[in-house]
Image (spheres, helix red, strand yellow):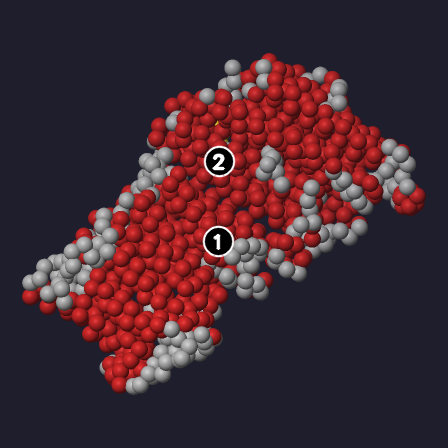
Amino acid sequence: MKTWIEAFSVIDFISVGILLTAVTLNAFKSIESYVKAYTINSWLLSGLIAVVALLAGETHLYIAALLTLATKGIIIPLFLRRIVRQMRVTHEVQPYISNSLSLAISGILVAVVYASLKDGIFVTGFSKNVLQISIAVILISLFIMITRKKALTLVMGLLFMENGLFLAGFSLTFGMPTIIELGVLFDMLMGVIILGIFAVQIKRAFASADLDNLTVLKG
Amino acid sequence: MEYFQFLIIIIFSPLVNGVVKKLKATMQGRQGPGVLQAYYDLMRLFKKDMVISTVTSWVFKATPFIVYVASIIAAMLVPVLTVRPAYGVMGDVIALIAVFALARFFMALAGLDAGTAFGGEGSSREMTVAILVEPMMMLALFTAAIATGSTNIASIAAAHGSGYSPSHLLALSAFMVAIVAETGRVPVDNPDTHLELTMIHEGMILEYSGRYLALMEWAHAIKQMVLFTLAVDIFFPFGIARDAGVEGLALSLGVYGMKMFGMAFLMAAVESTRAKVRFFQLPSILGGAFVLAFLSLVTHIMMGK
Amino acid sequence: MIAILIIPIVTAVACYLLKNPRVIGYVSLAGVAALAVYAYPTIAASLSGPVSAAEGAFSMDALSGYIMAIVLFLSLASAMYSISYLEHELETGLTDLRGVRRYYGLLHLFIFTMLLVTMADNLAIMWIGIEATTIVSALLIGLGFHKRPLAVEAAWKYIILCTVGITFALLGTFITYYASTAVMGTEGALNWTKLKTIAPRLNPETMKLAFIFVLVGYGTKAGLAPVHNWLPDAHSQAPSPISALLSGILLNTAFYGIMRFVSIVEPSTGNAFTGNLLIIFGLISVGIAAIFILVQENYKRLLAYSSIEHMGIISLGVGIGGPIGIYGALLHILNHALSKPLMFFASGKIQSRFGSQNIANVTGVLSSMPLLGALTFIGALSLSGTPPFNIFVSEFTVLKAGVDKGLWLVTALFLFFVVIVFYGVLSGFGKMLFGKPDEAMRERLAHHHAPGFNFGTMLGNGIMIFMALSVIVMGLKVPGFIDDTIRTCVQVLGVK
């Protein structure tokens, strides 16, 4: 099994898959596609952790993979779907810039990250490429957050950013101790739920989920 | 043998077209024309008289021949059964793309030449798509070229190892999108209709009839098969013969046939499951594929494989 | 020691389950009081030497004890003030029983999360605590959103910005873990007690990167410019007792996280790196806050910008470093935690009486409400840095540290900004305090018959008077026991 993983460079494929699901966000128009991409992204992430667990033979990594799958892969997507249905904003995410431009910019972002981290400041745990990819994912999600109008897309960007961060964490350290993983995941779960609640409240209070309405407070 | 392998493409390209049509019909639950229908069509067209608009110039008459010859040259550039280089230094991916560009240039000119609205429309759309597709194809091919250290298609096919890397997969996906766009298939263009609002390729050749039309259609079929062959050469070169031995060639021929069928099946599946998108949404899709190709290149440079 | 964390949770559950708003208020007060009494021995012990519990999962030294004492004091103050504040909200129909139960439940959870931050030995658990403060306090800010859409806006900005920021801090924590596992293996690799002992051996390049991420991340929470945008919105829209907690201790707990990292990163990278970054962030914060204070028309937002200014001063103090700089910063934490909540409490009363947050709509507070006016006046004088009030003392200490180190440019800029703030704060509150209430307002105030003797109001006023007195006392002379505590903290931080 281990030789098989190495021969087919499974880790590279999964991590590029994670990057790809983040890049596709730029092309999507509906918030449901965002949720789908996020689900795939989380599954890939948990799969990657499982593969690394197999390679390293560490029990706490298997637990981490399961936890990731349960929270990011199942609970959060289900919750997001409910929120989307509740808000009835199934259509456009209304980016500030066109999809093509946004795709191009995220491509450039990836290239910049690759170029600037080319030599790798870190000798990472299991693959020397994963850190670059995770930083690229983080940057792309930040980019998504600043160029999309709807409240929920901001939440999606945040979630992708967290996935990228987890990826970085795993590539650096083979994961944290289980109890800490648990705490971090729990915090993030609560954060997402509360963001979801607020998104619904924004919709209710301003009769639209456009963040353009949130400009009363300034100065 | 390697000097004549291009004839396979020229002879069988209408067949591939017919197979795609038949598969598409089967998937959509229709009877569909027989696989040889494309040959009958060509024969019928060759027999017919031509009607040529009086306002056209020499460009209109020269284009079918230029396009047809360009397609044949393209077919000569790709290795079909064996990776032995047939014509010395020829067989370069960049040359291949240049030949296609030449054909496209004259086709667009001919579309404008007749002075009809649809021809001009088709030409303008074709060039718009080309602007997006050509660099994408180049990038995807460059990834393969860098991986093997050569821009010669035969060398790329010969040097391809057994393993795949993420960059390969990304380049392949981008290249598939490029093929769909180049051959005028469904998400980009619809090869089956002459609906004036959407047609691209059909718009350009709308004024042609008889022998000229036959040449154009045949050239298009050849181009399609060249692209299919290029894809399998670069991304799945298994079973392709390394020399001119008879058993190797026979095996290679069988494998090649199956690969072509696989590509035809893929195209039919794409066409049957996708809907044609509006022209103004095309940049978004093709831009996405372009980013795929770009990512494949940078990923390759980063990972070194 | 674990019980310190259990008491607020029990209180939170009790507050949420009870059905009588008056009883809830006093139960909450009793809970915080019990907590303070129970925690006192632990804090006292931590000042003389490190204490730990739960097999080293929690561990406190003098700095944790100091911050925890401030957290507990302000929680107590806030619980006292909340009683009358919520009674008034209930009377005017701004909230209902459900709102009150939620408010108190969340208030105690909020206290719990901040205590967790001060007690955690593990940097990742500290991160969990700080992220939890964001979540709980966002709910507190957005509470009662059905009636106040602006609160939703504020809470949304707050939680989005802070979660993004804090995610960076997690990355920094990951990188620290990476650096420390390289030196000491995975066992306890994130415990600051252990990290401090191996700090000089950590890879400086890695730690630099980690510190940048952590500074941006926790800096967002601590309200350092230029990532402060959430702060004025959140502080102005939250209920006043919550604004007091946000400003008085939430910012400090986040800054506590930064200080922990500074003490780990500094031995590895040398103090020029951390110091310069903190000085730059501090100066930007003070500068931006000064400009916005000058043009501010909303007094709660003015107070919020003043918080940014004071966090900037604290950051400046830590950045300048040296025993005097750290001493000034720590003293400033306490002074700010006394003056700012006092001002928020007072502004809550002003807002409920005048029904506006706009400076222009409020005049003659001093003549119409002498006690409240006097308290506000003391607070405003203190916040603006007027001698001989407490904030002047700590600002002066930071300034002296800068002069001692010969950082002339920094000192000059700092002085310049502080003078602007002085003018801005005093002119803003001067307009509100002096003059006569206008005609309509006088009628409303006359109409507003003072309620008879009310224990809740008395508690609220009592704590405000106590805070005002301590503001004055701290200005005249720093009491001996506080002086000793801060000196111990400076030693514990290993500053020479």
Residue C274 visible from this viewpoint: yes
The x and y percentages for residue C124 are 46, 37
A26 lies left or right of A125: right
Crowd class of label 1 (few under 14; some 14 to 19; many from 20; radius 10 Å): many
Crowding near pointer 2: few (<14 within 10 Å), some, many (20+)? many
Q: Is residue B136 above or below residue C129?
A: below
Residue drawn at 40 percent across, 31 percent down: C206
The residue wearing badge 1 is: A102
In the image, farthest residue toward the left:
B246
Q: Is residue C352 above or below residue C198?
A: below
Residue tagged by mark 2? C213
Q: Position of residue C134 (x, y in %)?
A: 58, 42
Residue shown at 55%/17% (left/top)? Answer: C322
The vertical placement of B305 against C59, above or below, is below
- Measured as percent of width and height from the top left, residue C477 is found at 71, 16
The quarter of the picture where residue C67 lies is top right
Q: Secondary structure at mark 1?
A: helix
Which percent across, then down, holds residue C479?
68, 18
- Judging depth in this view, the residue of B144 and A56 nearest the camera is B144
Identity, as a three-letter code, of the amino acid under mark 1: Ser
